[in-house]
Structures are given as structure tokens and as C-alpha cells.
Amino acid sequence: MRLRNPKQVIRLDAVWWEAGLAVELDGRQAHATARAFDADRERDRRLAAQYGLHVVELWGELWVVVPFVILVAILGLGGAVLAPTERRLAELAASGMDSPEYDATFLREMTLSNVLAGLVLVAIFLMVTKLGA
């Protein structure tokens, strides 16, 4: 779709006028330099001002980025540490849960699980309060 204004033609991939939403489907190359990124943000501001289209740019927001990093950390630690530790705990439990190795492994598992639960709470706090927005 092409929007005309007195100064330029703006090309958009999709527009839903009823919702006041414009969508642009471009890749990293369109934002590879700081200048290209800034020009794209300026165009978004013009679309919002001239046509009443709602422009949302959330990736740079603290309350979006930090929970995403927390999610990646939880998934990574879950697969790399928690799952193997749980398997080891099951093996140790089969041979008797009164061994010092079982106690130490269980303590490590519970400590990491509590840390990850704390990170989930931090992510929830950031998303609810939109801290940094």
C-alpha cells in the first residue's frame, strides 16, 4: 500500500485502517545501521501523527528485553542442568535416598530451582509494572 503526503510516498506492507494498525515486514538489513534504524523510527512517528496509525516498538524496552533474556536463561538451564540433575536424582533414589551424594545433588537442584523461580518473579514484576517504559 502506498500513502501519499505532500513530501513523500510511504510504502507499507499491510494496513488495517479500522484497527489503526500498519505492518511493515522487513528484515535486519533495513535496520543494519543506526541511520537506517533512526529513519525507520522517524517514519513510524510520521505515520502515527499524519494518519493516526498506532506504532508500537517494544524490543528496546527494559520490561520486554529482560524477561526475554530470563526466558532464554531458564530454558537453557532447564535443559542443560535441571533435566540431567533430575535424572541423576532418580538414579540415586532407586539405590536409596540416604546417601550424601543424593543430599548434595538434591540441594543443588532445589537451589537452582529457587533461583529460577526468583527470576520468573522478576520477569513478572517487570512485565506488570512496565519498569523503564
Image (spheres, helix red, strand yellow):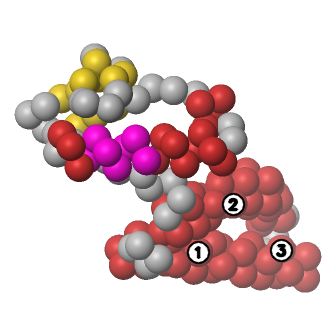
User: What residue is shown with label 3?
Assistant: 105
Quote the CA–CA distance across marks 2 and 3.
Answer: 21 Å
In-image side of 119 versus 57 (left or right): right
For the point 47% across and 77% down, which residue is it?
132
Question: Magenta segment range?
Answer: 42-48
User: What residue is shown with label 2?
Assistant: 73
x then y, percent, for residue 128 = 35, 74
* Mark closer to the chain start, 2 or 1: 2
x then y, percent, for residue 25 = 45, 26
**Marks 2 and 3: CB-CB under 8 Å?**
no
Above or below 18: residue 133: below
Quarter-of-image position of residue 116: bottom right
In-image side of 46 versus 66 (left or right): left
Q: Amino acid at mark 3?
A: Thr
Q: How many marks?
A: 3
Above or below 18: residue 46: below
x then y, percent, for residue 35 = 63, 45
From where the camera sits, is residue 72 visible?
yes
**Marks 2 and 1: CB-CB under 8 Å?**
yes
Whether residue 44 is in magenta: the answer is yes
Q: Residue furthest top?
A: 1
Per the image, label 2 sits on a secondary structure element best described as helix
Quadrant occupied by the C terminus: bottom left
